[in-house]
Image (spheres, rainbow, N blue to C red):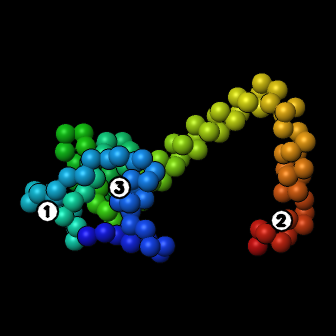
Amino acid sequence: MATQTGYGLDISKFMEIENLDFEKVEINPEMAQFINSKETKCYKVSWTRVLPLVKTRNVYLRDGWAFVTVENVQDILVDEFKSHLQKQLAKGARHWSNNGLSDEENRLVPIFNFFTTEWVFKNFMK
């Protein structure tokens, strides 16, 4: 059974497009006692990747793995996004600290100045 987003793309297809290759396993009777889901499959991921779900006991844990239902897969996606964003911000910080500003000054400084004006805060930050 595919879980549809509001845009006609199911989660499995989205994960495939974004190269998020997590092992998909059948929900066995032992797991079913702990997982409330209509789905027959779940994703097997390291338990450290879904700590909020572990905290709220919304996953089945076994041998260092968390079994995440499709309904809760957004936590995996959020974790992947945060990880990617942190890497890119660190890369950007290194670029700026190595005199990267001189390369980008004509292009980016006007944009930064625009977003720091009072008009922007009044009109877009409501």
Residue for badge 2: 121
Which of the labelled discs sits on residue 123, or is there none? none
Looking at the picture, which amino acid does disc 3 mark?
A: Leu
Cα separation, mark 1 vs mark 3, equals 16 Å
Mark 1 = which residue?
A: 33
Residue at screen point 40% across, 54% down:
15
Residue 44 x/y as whole percent: 26, 48
Residue 123: percent from left, percent from top: 83, 72
Does residue 111 appear left or right of residue 41 in this picture?
right
Marks 1 and 2, the one that precedes in the sequence: 1
Q: Residues within 10 Å of mark 3 (few under 14, many from 20)?
A: some
Name the N-terminal-most of marks 2 and 3: 3
Regarding residue 75, the answer to whether it shows in the image is no
Q: Residues within 10 Å of mark 2 (few under 14, many from 20)?
A: few
33 vs 113: above or below: below
Name the residue rendered at 77%, 32% in the picture: 96
Instruction: Quickly name the residue at label 3.
Output: 53
Q: Mark 1: which amino acid?
A: Gln
